Image: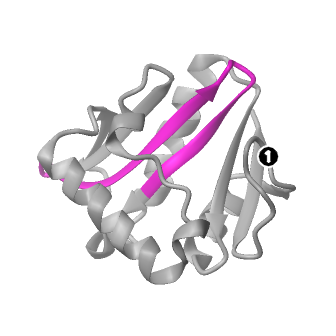
Amino acid sequence: MNDVKIGIERPDQPEVVALLAASDRYTAALYPAESNHMLDVADLLLPEVTFVVARLAGKALGCASLVNKSGQYAEIKRMYVDEAARGSGLGKALMAALNEQAAASGVAYLRLETGIHQPEAIALYHRDGFTDIRPFGDYEPDPLSIFMEKRL
């Protein structure tokens, strides 16, 4: 995916809002509402959030964000790749961009929560150096969730 451009963008663009809506539908089909921990567009516009979009030939095909948690760590949220682009390496490219943004922000580690019914995402995170941890922050234990961390 050499032609992919990943950059910091606003999440309130119509094409990106549509991508986030696809993400919402995808996770809603896998998990009950209480196990979905999504940030909405308003939350993604907060100053502590860095939102990135992956584009191929100008089309938004993936997105992700980093939420800086008081400089201690950054949490990955809203990581999503359009169904048509899965398996193309776009997720790996998004992870590389997130790692770069996190390192530049000076945080010591990354954390995330993902669901047990997303084996491709879990494998991507493990390949990127994440290890499983206990629930963190405001998360409660959930048998449908996996919590991960990566030291930078």
Q: Residue at x 47, y 29 (%)?
A: 49
**Is residue 130 in view from this perspective?**
no
57 magenta-colored: yes
**Is residue 35 in view from this perspective?**
yes
To which quarter of the image does residue 106 belong?
top right
Q: Which residues are magenta?
A: 56-79
Q: Residue at x 75, y 23 (%)?
A: 72
Residue 80 in the image, given as x and y percentages of width and height: 41, 59
To which quarter of the image does residue 76 belong?
top right
In front of the other: 109 or 134: 134
Q: Residue at x 55, y 33 (%)?
A: 67
38 magenta-colored: no
| Left or right, residue 54 beside residue 74 | left
Residue at which label 1 appears: 136
Callout 1: SS: loop
Residue 115 in the image, given as x and y percentages of width and height: 63, 70
| Left or right, residue 133 beside residue 51 | right
| Left or right, residue 22 beside residue 100 | left
Residue 39 in the image, given as x and y percentages of width and height: 46, 47
In front of the other: 87 or 140: 140
| Quadrant in which the N terminus is drawn | bottom left
Is residue 111 shown above or below 125?
above
The dominant secondary structure in magenta is: strand
In front of the other: 69 or 60: 69
| Quadrant in which the C terminus is drawn | top right
Is residue 135 shown above or below 122?
above
The amino acid type found where label 1 is placed reads Phe
Residue 101 in the image, given as x and y percentages of width and height: 52, 28
Is residue 3 shown above or below 69?
below
Asked which colour scheme the image uses, the reply is one colour
